[in-house]
Image: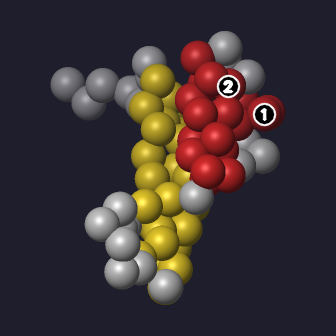
Amino acid sequence: MTERKKTKYVHEGQLVAEVEVSIVEDDTGWSPYISVEDAYKLDDVREALRQNDLESAAKYARIYELHPVA
């Protein structure tokens, strides 16, 4: 079993969060996958962005605000 870090992006409205998760690779048919804790972390960040609670989302991620270019 090996683990490697990967950046996942969570997009809600005009906000994007950059969340670091661990990808697990093993010999099972479910590989690659993320841990339950990382899945909950992604869910928590998504919910915080929906509620515009940037302080809570920033505990787990870097937050960016999107602006139209043209």
Percent across and percent down for residue 14 are 45, 22
Give the residue type at disc 2. Answer: Ala
Q: In which quarter of the image is the C terminus?
A: top left
Q: Disc 1 designates what residue? A: 56
SS category of the residue bearing label 1: helix
Q: Which sits in the foreground, 63 or 44?
A: 44
Give the residue type at disc 1. Answer: Ser
User: Who's the residue at 78% across and 46% down the image?
Assistant: 59
Q: Disc 2 designates what residue? A: 48
Q: Which sits in the foreground, 11 or 22?
A: 22
Q: Residue furthest top?
A: 51
Q: In this view, does 54 lie to the left or right of 6?
A: right
User: Who's the residue at 47% across and 68% down the image?
Assistant: 23
Percent across and percent down for residue 24 are 48, 72
Q: Is residue 50 above or below residue 33?
A: above
Mark 2 → mark 1, Cα distance in angstroms: 6 Å
Q: In this view, does 54 lie above or below 17?
A: above
Q: In this view, does 49 lie above or below 59?
A: above
Q: Which residue lies furthest to the front in this view?
A: 28
Q: Is residue 37 left or right of residue 20?
A: right
The numbered mark, 2 or 1, whose residue comes first in the sequence reads: 2
User: Who's the residue at 65% across and 44% down the image?
Assistant: 41
